[in-house]
Amino acid sequence: MIPCAIVGGSGYIGGELIRLLLSHPKINLVAVTANEMAGFPISKSHPNLSHVDMNFNTLENIHPAEVIFSALPHGKLMEVIHSFSGKTIIDTSADFRLQNQSEFEKFYKTSHCAFEKTKLFSYGLPELFRSTIKTAKNIAAPGCFATAAILSIFPIVAEQLNKEIIINAVTGSSGSGIKPKDKTNHSFRADSFYAYELFNHRHVPEIKQALLHKTGHDIDLTFQPHSGPFVRGIYATSIIKLNKKITRSELLNIYKKYYSDDYFIRLVDDTPNIKWVQNTNFCDLGIETNGHTAIITTAIDNLLKGGAAQAVQCFNIINQFDERTGLPLFSSNP
């Protein structure tokens, strides 16, 4: 059993990490921190875990842990990373994803006080970067929108079939985090659908960086997020202008070429539905083309494949466990 701790366990991703790590057969969860909640039972933030006899702790009490899962808000891990010297860190925030400091500070609107540590982190999208994750000391897990977008278009970019790419993506309210904000309360979100952060979403440089690193190709990308009236899930529709004519069968074979060995990628016959991926680590992809334009539809659970479960998938790869270990494999939705 590997002793692990969760730092920043009071939010939605933190709650999912607690649930996953407590049921993981290879993990001993020794501490969960949440400074504002220190001393309170974890059920104070996560009533679904009321049967778990564990209190939130402080950073000073995580020393037995060999692995730190960080679910701190963006900008916070960089401030305390010195506390985790010698430990493996799997981070679900954006602090060490981007390799360009000016881009980080532009898109996250904060200065970076530990950017030199970025070189110690490997990007944690298993389906593309499994080989580097295997030997990594620390992992910067991808953002939720970035996960859906990258997996959606990677095979087309890798085959250099793309011209212009437009991605419209919709997220549920849990993507805004546990703390209430002006546009996250129920009276605003219910029956609501709207676009936000036009041309300026923080996951755009992450998407482009990952694809450039993996394929060597820069892309012409327009990414537009939307807020949807549901709690968990991301649905992305990627529209790719192709530079040569291709049939659906040929395009489907390209996706099978890149993803046939990836358990958590499912190529569906029609279009996916967020219902079918909720509470799982799956990414469902629908593939269609009229010959000149491809439309790839993608569904993931933003808190799991876009957050906590993907972090655990990386943990499994680092430790040479089956990638499915400790991860939910079935949605309860029909």
Image (spheres, grey):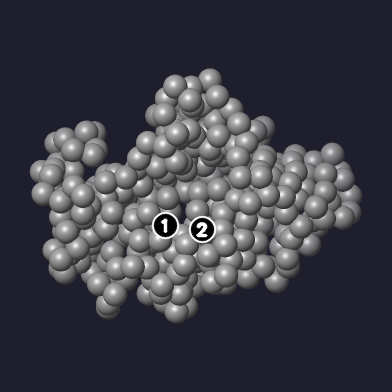
Which corner quadrant of the image does residue 238 belong to?
Answer: top right
Q: Quadrant of residue 169?
A: top right
At x 51%, y 71%, the residue is 131
Given residues 127 and 203, the one toward you in this image is 203
State the residue position of label 2. Answer: 108
**Residue at screen point 61% across, 61% down:** 205
The answer to whether mark 2 and mark 1 are in CB contact below 8 A is: yes
Q: Quadrant of the N terminus?
A: bottom left
The circle drawn on residue 74 is 1
Q: Is residue 109 visible?
A: yes
Front residue of this view, candidates 221 and 128: 221
How far is disc 2 from disc 1 in space, using C-alphas? 8 Å
In the image, residue 155 above or below residue 283: below
Say if 243 sits above or below 195 in the image.
below
Figure check: 257 above or below 305: below
- Where residue 224 appears, as percent x and y from the top left, is 66, 43
Q: Earlier in the sequence, mark 2 or mark 1?
A: 1
- Name the foreground residue: 71 vs 241: 71
Which residue sits at x=54%, y=52%? 147
- Taking depth in this image into account, of 53 and 11 the one nearest to the observer is 11
Label at residue 251:
none
Q: Amino acid at mark 2?
A: Tyr
